[in-house]
Image: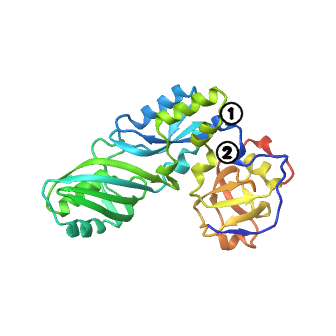
Amino acid sequence: MEWYTREEAETSEKFGCIPEKRSVEELFEKGIIIVDKPFGPTSNQVSTWLKKELNLKKTGHFGTLDPNATGVLPVGVNSGTRLNPALAKTDKEYIFEAELREKRTEEKIRQTLKGFEGVNKQVPPEKSAVKRQERERDVYETELIETYEQKVLGRVKCESGFYVRVLISQLAEKLSTEADMTELRRTQQGQITENDANTLQDIVDAYHFYKEGDEKPIRKVLHPVEKAVNHLKKIAVKDSAVNAVSNGANLGTSGISKFQDKIKRGETIAITTLKGELVALAEAEMTSEELYDEDGTAAKLKSVHMSPETYPKRWKQ
């Protein structure tokens, strides 16, 4: 997304820190680990196992994967778990394999799968953790990757809360047959992809190297919490505004230095410092167009994620 400047400002090296330059100890206090979840354990089991193996006070995953599913599973570390609402409900991408009871032509399968793009009505499966009532979810993209005999390999990019298992059942129904999901892998969540993910063994190995004095491996698996909000549009505030926002004050336009385009009223945005540090999550009160030159409240806070002592008090709302 493009950045626009409302008022030029500089940031002091005396306060705060570029997220990627934080110490490993700080990252353990507030960070995120991207797990390549293996087949078998539940998402909660993976999170709990990491807590034990890395000697952490608290962990929490951002978006459940079924035990028989693999792939991208972000896990918050200690106070990084507070970012769950920002990442758990983001759009997701899956690769699935299904086996049809009866063979159908590749072109027929492709056309039928394409028909699911748009708004879909679904009832969550029986084993799901949510109430089983019909709801609507968007599918943004579908792709038939290949077919082999009665097996179908496909990709779907969808809104959070969309069940691929239900999609496979509906796909089979439209093809006048039945089907079983044989594999499911989450390849993307928000802007986090499977290229960011690490196996449990790699994560534990990196932790042991860290305990022995080598930080390089752990820095590849332990990320700043800002990674969890990469998908959100952002407003960067002046150093003089950071203290007020981190103390819970709503963001006024006089505190803004830069902002990204396409911000809409009512959507969740990230308020950051000019160094890229996450200060707070907020609800936009103005569009990007209005942020150029209008005065007033730009955003109302939803949650604060920076300690008030990080930047000095120099600005009043």
The numbered mark, 2 or 1, whose residue comes first in the sequence reads 1
Q: In the structure shown, which secondary structural element does the residue marked by tag 1 occupy?
A: helix
Q: How is the image coloured?
A: rainbow
Q: What is the x, y in percent for residue 57? A: 59, 28
Location of residue 253 in the rendering, given as x and y in whole percent from the top left corner: 76, 64
- Crowding at dot 2, Cα within 10 Å, few <14 / some 14-19 / many 20+, comes out as many
Residue at x 60%, y 50% (from the top left corner) = 227
Q: At 56% across and 28% down in the image, what residue appears? A: 54
Choose between 117 and 126: the one closer to the eye.
Answer: 117
Q: Picture quarter containing residue 148?
A: bottom left
Q: Which residue is mark 1?
A: 25
Between 25 and 290, which is closer to the camera in this rendering? 25
Residue positioned 67% across, 36% down in the render:
24
Position of residue 279 measured from the top left corner of the image (x, y, whole percent):
70, 49
In this rendering, the count of numbered labels is 2
Residue picked out by circle 2: 305
Task: Give the mark toward the camera: 2 or 1.
Answer: 1
Query: Which image quarter holds the C terminus?
Result: bottom right
Q: What label does residue 261 carry, if any?
A: none
Cα gap from disc 2 to disc 1, whole angstroms: 17 Å
Compared with residue 39, is residue 317 higher up or lower down, i.e. above or below?
A: below
Q: Is residue 203 above or below residue 235?
A: above
Left or right: 158, with 79 as reference point: left
